[in-house]
Image (spheres, rainbow, N blue to C red):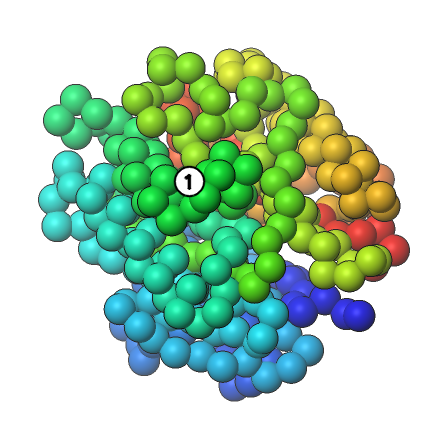
Amino acid sequence: MVFPFTVAYCDANSANERLTNDHLLALIQFQAPVHVDPDPRRCLVPLPELGGTATAEVWLSPRPVQTGMVSGVGYAGNGEALFLQLQSDEYAPDALQPLIAVAYRRLFAVARAQGYPHFLRIWNYLPDINQECSGLERYRAFCAGRRQVLDAVLTEVETRLPAASAIGFPASPVFPDGKSVEEGSLCLYALATQEPGEQIENPRQVSAFHYPPEYGLRSPSFSRAVLKRWSNDSHHLYISGTASVVGHASRHDDLLAQLDEILVNLDALLTEAGRRAGTPLQPALLRVYMRPASDPAPLRQRIAQAFGGAVPVVFLQADICRQELLIEIEGLAVSAAR
């Protein structure tokens, strides 16, 4: 059996040509939103890319996909995997919690209506994620809105949580081409399937959903990774945003020291997932979010050394969910034989 879709990076300058391919499941582009005819498969993530490169992410299906739009949620499915995406404007700075709750209800409702009730991975991009509104940090308001819906739609919620990232950007980030994002635009996209994956936790870290109250009244609700077994020898591991956190505490003030701690965390996740899968897993691609707009070349070199080869990596300028954290890494790993 082949995977129901594959993921790869490509040159952003030719990415739009992929929209003519009826095997395209998703196209993730890192740029300011533009006013064009919407394609449910095309998601614009409002984060500038670092390093002078222009990259897009392509999800390709071995068979044609069916697309649609319901309640503002665009979707594309191929019978085994469903891509969903939603973009929304905030109507008030302190309305993030109810807005996220509405967005999550719509995502889950559309996925279930299409026959894909199990979420493996959700990506969340929020303007001004560390800003306080009415005495509450916006990331904590996001966590409260998300958990409100997950408690309602998931049974045994703490064993069925999807992998996730929650990443911030300035309310009006400026891109190298001079374009900016409209203030208050949220961006969410997700992967859902007909059968569940397996939740993977990092033995070096407290599970996020068990964080103590100092991190908010509602803990962040995600798994460290989700392992999806497509067949006996075909596995995907969807790795959540991983930071320099040991136990539940942030570690290190230096960017490279934080990167080294993240690499240890990623190795621990890959080891645990490989044990569960019964086969080694290796990164197929990684996405790095960085606060400082610095040269990513030294980081790229360390990442390549850690994984013994040139793993495709995209570096994006972004805000992290904790103000002291400078970098976060997420990615996809696959069965080593694949």
Mark 1 is on which residue type?
Answer: Ala
Label 1: state its secondary structure. Answer: strand
* Image position of 257 with respect to 232: above or below: above
In this rendered view, identify the residue nearer to me: 76 or 127. Answer: 76
Q: Position of residue 3 (x, y in %)?
A: 72, 66
Residue at horizontal 61%, vertical 40%?
199
State how many labels appear: 1
In this rendered view, identify the residue nearer to me: 305 or 277. Answer: 277
In this rendered view, identify the residue nearer to me: 192 or 335. Answer: 192
Question: Where does the N terminus fall, quadrant-wise?
Answer: bottom right
Question: Where does the C terminus fall, quadrant-wise?
Answer: bottom right
Q: Position of residue 75 (x, y in %)?
A: 43, 71
Residue 6 in which image quadrant = bottom right
* Location of mark 1 (residue): 166
Residue at horizontal 49%, vertical 39%?
156
* Image position of 171 with respect to 9: above or below: above
Q: Position of residue 270 (x, y in %)?
A: 74, 37
Residue at horizontal 40%, vertical 69%?
113
Q: Position of residue 162 (x, y in %)?
A: 51, 45
Label 1, residues with CA under 10 Å away: few <14, some 14-19, many ≥20:
many
Camera sees residue 204: yes
Residue at horizontal 40%, vertical 35%?
319
